Image (tube, rainbow, N blue to C red):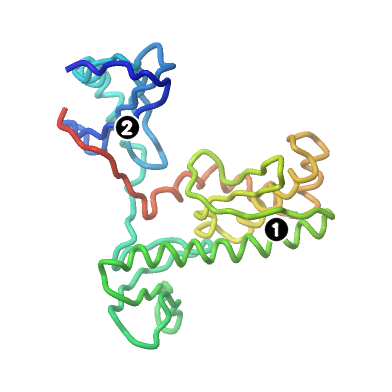
């Protein structure tokens, strides 16, 4: 059945498909500006994204995908497996691997606590019912990320003689931070998974944009003034940054068989 063009030039909600021969989810995105069918493999979500013109039929998209199925499999094979926030799984926290432990309901216990007493790998003890443990852990990680980023932003803003209007956290995949013309700084909460010097660099980078809204020579001198490990942090993000998106990744959309 063909999809008809909507009156508004807006991007539709992606359609998630289960495709025989491909273990990863496939998302079909109808875009009014697309002139041809394109495929890409998301390294951050371990998923296949197919962008198609607005009037493209699902059977036409299916044929295009199957023509390129070997290419898709090869690219997917390079992407690390996602790691859910589940009991006994390991995730990084401030650059060090921790083992998740769902401890169950318990009075008087913190929602999440770190246990380093006897284990070679520290434990992240998550209290409460198992059904809500993953959400509790993510909320805790987001809160820790905000604490660390606010401290770093405050320190760097003082060094450069500026002030951030507000700090927000998101789960963005295209960038680690951004600075609006109005002085609002936005960061990925996943920076809390990276080593602290990496989070510190991203904070300094966005504070630098409060002075210079570009990536010119003066901008980089401002960032280097705040973080001596700037080059090391940039290299870490290039090599390991995309890996952070596989922890606790969630995929939710309508699903169809293809």
Tell me the residue at 16%/27% (across/down).
258
Relative vertical location of residue 162 with respect to residue 26 in this rendering, above or below? below
Q: Seen from this angle, which residue lies furthest bottom?
A: 108
Q: Position of residue 192 (x, y in %)?
A: 53, 60
Outermost residue on the front side: it is 7
Q: Is residue 253 left or right of residue 111?
A: left
Residue at image location 78% in from the left, 34% down from the top: 216
Expressed as whole percent of the image width and height from the top left, the position of residue 112 reads 42, 75
Q: Give residue 46's position: percent from left, percent from top.
A: 34, 40
**Residue 30 position by quadrant:** top left
- Residue at image mark 2: 14
Taking 137 as reference, is 165 left or right?
Answer: right
Q: Look at mark 1 in the image and give the residue it sits on.
A: 153
Closer to the observer: label 2 or label 1?
A: 2
Apparent side of residue 134 relative to residue 64 in the rendered image (left or right): right
Percent x, y of residue 106: 32, 84
Q: In the picture shown, does residue 249 fall above or below 17?
A: below
Q: Measured along the vertical axis of the image, is residue 75 above or below residue 146?
A: above
Number of on-image labels: 2
Query: Of all residues shown, which one is farthest toward the top?
Result: 35
Q: Left of 160 or right of it: where is 243?
A: left
Element class at badge 2? loop
Q: Earlier in the sequence, mark 2 or mark 1?
A: 2
**Dot 1, crowdedness within 10 Å: few (<14), some or many (≥20)?**
many
Which quadrant is home to the N terminus?
Answer: top left
Residue at (44% x, 16% y) in the render: 33
Indicate the secondary structure of the residue bearing disc 1: helix
Instruction: Identify the residue at image location x=27%, y=16%.
Output: 4
Tell me where residue 150 sits by quadrant: bottom right
């Amino acid at each position: 059945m063909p999809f008809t063009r909507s009156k508004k030039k807006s991007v539709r909600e992606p359609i998630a498909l289960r495709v025989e021969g491909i273990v990863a989810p496939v998302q079909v995105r109808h875009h009014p500006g697309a002139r041809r069918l394109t495929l890409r493999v998301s390294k951050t979500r371990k998923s296949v994204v197919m962008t198609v013109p607005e009037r493209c039929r699902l059977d036409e998209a299916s044929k295009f995908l199957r023509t390129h199925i070997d290419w898709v499999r090869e690219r997917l094979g390079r992407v690390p497996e996602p790691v859910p926030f589940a009991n006994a799984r390991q995730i990084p926290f401030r650059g060090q691997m921790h083992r998740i432990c769902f401890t169950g309901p318990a009075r008087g216990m913190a929602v999440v606590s770190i246990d380093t007493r006897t284990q070679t790998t520290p434990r992240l003890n998550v209290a409460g019912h198992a059904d809500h443990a993953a959400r509790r852990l993510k909320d805790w990680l987001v809160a820790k990320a905000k604490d660390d980023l606010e401290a770093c932003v405050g320190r760097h803003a003082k060094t450069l003689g500026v002030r951030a209007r507000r700090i927000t956290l998101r789960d963005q995949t295209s960038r680690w931070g951004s600075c609006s013309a109005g002085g609002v700084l936005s960061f990925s909460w996943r920076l809390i998974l990276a080593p602290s010097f990496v989070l510190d660099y991203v904070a300094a980078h966005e504070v630098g944009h409060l002075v210079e809204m570009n990536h010119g020579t003066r901008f980089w001198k401002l960032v280097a003034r705040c973080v001596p490990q700037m080059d090391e942090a940039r290299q870490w993000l290039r090599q390991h940054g995309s890996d952070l998106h596989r922890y606790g990744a969630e995929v939710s959309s309508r699903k169809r068989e293809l």
